[in-house]
Image (cartoon, rainbow, N blue to C red):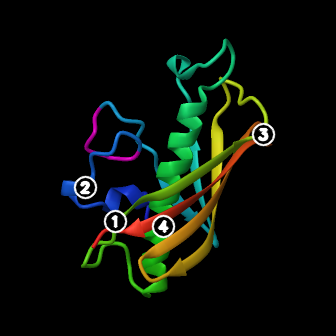
Amino acid sequence: MPDERAFQDYYPDDVAHCYGCGRLNEKGLHVRSFWDGDETVCRYLPAPHHTALPGFVYGGLIASLIDCHATGSAAAAGYRAQGRAMDTEPALRYVTAALKVDYLAPTPLGPELELRGTIKEVKGRKVVVAVSVRANGIETAKGEVVAVRLA
């Protein structure tokens, strides 16, 4: 049976408080990311309070989802590049060095969002991740994150 834990479940307790992806932040978004072949995937259902205009998701939430999915994906890619499991020491934790988001179409509030990440580069402490956001199969946003490993 494959591991059911999300990338973010492997974050050490001292760095697991992020509003977007920290499992220890009880009021956070609890972004959860997984491998799907060579891509990463996250599914997220925005709540009614994540609204911008009636019927549409707030763009800041979209940016947060891209950010946290990408940094989790960067950690997973870092472990993969080192040929080791995510539960091995030393723990790898990545933070955002740069975030770029393109909003392609209004994201409807109601359907579950699917985020797909592609690892573009793993070099030293840096990982570059491209992320696509889809609602009802339609790409509504895309982003790119440059993530750096904490020392």
Q: Is residue 65 left or right of residue 125?
A: right
Residue 84 spot, x, y in % from top left: 39, 84
Mark 4 belongs to which amino acid?
Ala
Task: Find out whether the residues at labels 2 and 1 contact each other: C-beta distance under 8 Å.
Answer: yes
Task: Find out whether the residues at labels 3 and 1 contact each other: C-beta distance under 8 Å.
Answer: no
Q: Secondary structure at mark 2?
A: helix
Q: Is residue 44 left or right of residue 95?
A: right
- Where, by quadrant of the figure, is residue 90 drawn? bottom left
Residue 149 spot, x, y in % from top left: 37, 70
Disc 3 from disc 4: Cα separation: 24 Å
Disc 2 from disc 1: Cα separation: 8 Å
Instruction: Based on the picture, tell me whether residue 23 belongs to the magenta stretch.
Output: yes
Front: mark 2 or 3 = 3
Mark 2 belongs to which amino acid?
Val
Mark 1 belongs to which amino acid?
Arg
- Nearest the camera: 72 or 52? 52
Q: Which mark is residue 93?
A: 1
Above or below residue 99? Residue 48 is above
Write down the residue under mark 2: 15
Write down the residue under mark 3: 104
Marks 3 and 4, the one that precedes in the sequence: 4
Disc 4 from disc 1: Cα separation: 8 Å
Write down the residue under mark 4: 74
Disc 3 from disc 1: Cα separation: 30 Å
- Where, by quadrant of the figure, is residue 92 drawn? bottom left
Residue 104 spot, x, y in % from top left: 78, 39
